[in-house]
Image (spheres, helix red, strand yellow):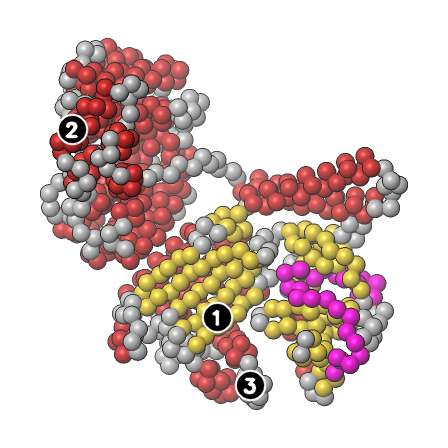
Amino acid sequence: MTMKYEKLAQFMEGLASDFVFLDQKEIDVPTAGNFLNVLDQVSREAEETQVGEAVKIAGALSVLLEKIVLLQIGDAGKAYRALEEGITAIQQVVSSYRKMGRSEVSVDEILSVVLEACGDDRIRELMGERKEEEEAPAAPPEEAAKGASFEIEDEGLLRDFITEGLEYISEIEVNILNLEQNPTDKDCINAIFRPFHSVKGVAGFLNLSEIRGLAHSLENLLDKARNDELEVTQPLIDVVLDGSDTLKSMIGQLKDRLEGKEMKPLNTDLSVLSKRIDAVGSGEEAEKPQKLGQILVSGGALSEEALEASLQTSQTIVPKKKIGETLIQEGKVSPKQVSQALRKQAEQVSDTTTIRIDTRKLDDLIDMVGELVITQSMIQQGLSQQFNGDRKLMRTVAQFFQITSELQRTSTSLRMMPIKQTFQRMARLARDLGKNNGKQVTVEMVGEDTEIDRNMVDEIYNPLVHMVRNSVDHGLESTEDRRIAGKPEKGMIQLKAYHRGGNIVIEIVDDGKGLNREKILEKAKKNGLVHSTDNLADQDIFRLIFLPGFSTAEKVTEVSGRGVGMDVVRQAIDRLRGKIEIESAPGKGTTFTLSFPLTLAIIDGMIVKVGSERYIVPTTAIRQALRPSREVYNAIAGKGETINVMGNLLPLVRVYELFGKEPLHRNPWEAIIVVTEGEGRAKCLMVDEIVGKAEVVIKSLGEGLKNVQGIAGGAILGDGQIGLIIDPEGLFELSEGVRNG
């Protein structure tokens, strides 16, 4: 008797726990949607186990919660009390059925309480009181969706659903692509199932019938797959992807309607899509997930007789123990077997408590923290000569600096977000491009939880799109060519993200044919970009692909071949103060490594002096600083000046010449050389002295000065004066232009 109602009891435990998270003042859509989903599970399970009292009460509570969220309740306090009484009543009903197989709870009494709280006629129907008037015929699904979707009294609820729904779709896309590579991964199937379930629940709650219906159909399809009633095949993958695309379009329509934009017609015929889903999912109704004991029995780890005996034992033990613990103690199964069974049984749901903040408020906070950092620098400089042995003052100031630094790190982290969603979009793009080009593409993602400044997300999107396109179109061979080369038929593109020092690093790796060094050189010569190939390293040759209009493609396709994309990549990287490196081997593939500052707001910099002016060089670009001897300096006719640094001749850039300043030192061996690195090449910046290291807040120079070559921005120094932030790569290009001009 107990076993029959065990799952219903588990659902009720979850329902009671979820009730705690319902804010009586303001309930958000995701929380309400989750609560409604659990109520739906309770109702279905109660119907399966023929616990009619629980079915009625759960239905009534769903109606009540709907009215609460839509602000259609006069007395909110009474409504929440009714909700609480209803949950308690279901718990009592389930407990009675587990003990006696029946219940003496007065359902009508509970329904009356709910009816009094919300006054909805649907509650009367549950009580057997039918309305005298005939119900109006239901509108066709299309009309119902168009009408009801926008009759919601609280527009904010719909906006929350749109935001959450699009996030769910992005989550689905990446997991379905992972499932394509691992068709038997149940965790992956569950990770797709859950977002569809959530979309269905909230859409039903908001009367978005078409969205709910489609999500429900896809949810059922995946339910069969996770219960081993349906094999994960390519048609299933394709129809789920098409279904998620359609849901995204439908949610996009809601957004357009709210923003007063013209509604775009759907590209997908819902009736055709529905038939495809039915065709893929044809088969018997999915079985309910097995209990722990059933899993152990079906797996051969335990006999039914032994399970039944242990169940009887577990009920007599005080305090009661879970069946898994009992089986282990009795020596009937091993802990490993129980662990495996629990993992198979579990539907792992991750709950993260978050709040939504207006991004403008967040930006204001970051700006104020930046001003605090500037003020700290001023205080530090002003007090440096005034401590006079006052240890108490020194400790107080040190504590203030520590708190400021911690506040800065915390506030900066608030603006960070995982790169996961961007990678998901790239993975989908690669798959679709490969399919269109007749190529099989596998996308691997590594480090998708790596966080990046949200202001960078939009900036890096287009560069990544162009690079992924080129990898699929030019990098990966056709299936036949890969077969001939002895490679796997499926080409691999790997997207990797990680932190290195103060930078975020993104790698785009493919196992294709690699860059053709000779073909690039030939094209460059033809276009007059290079005249001599002497002393050209592979990196120098590979960087030619970033020049405007440069392309080695034999034909122009819809995807690439016009020589525009990689130029866009280079420009975007420059704007972000980043750098790019290329590694490629013929027949093995190519790796593009993009490196950006972790944040665009605050940087560590070395303050240097050139004449009477102070400049800031980002520490991420600095390899070393030295005072060279006279012997390592070389002046090569037609080649400029170089400094021999550890056996490497590096070009010398006299900063004072570029900025028109009168230097303290004109001889390199009397000055300080700052060795910087970017774009895979190093150079030497000649400065008069190093003032020190500082953490500075980057300030824009305004529209008129934002594109000054060699300057990345400005910063307020500790004494209140302005210091310009040097862009080493831009400075080097500026020096080459001056020399060649």
| Residue at the extreme left | 284
**Relative to residue 691, is residue 731 drawn left or right?**
left
Q: Which residues are magenta?
A: 608-634
Mark identifier at residue 308: 2
Q: Earlier in the sequence, mark 3 or mark 2?
A: 2
Q: For mark 3, what is the residue?
A: 530
Q: Secondary structure at mark 3?
A: loop
- Residue at image position (29%, 41%) is 336
- Type of the residue with mark 3: Val
* Camera-nearest residue between 135 and 484: 484
Q: Position of residue 181 (x, y in %)?
A: 29, 58
Residue that badge 1 annotates: 566
Earlier residue among tags 1 and 3? 3
Q: Quadrant of residue 689?
A: bottom right
Q: Calculate the distance from the C-alpha at mark 1 to the C-alpha at mark 3.
A: 18 Å
What is the spatial separation of the Cα atoms under label 3 and label 2, in whole angstroms?
82 Å
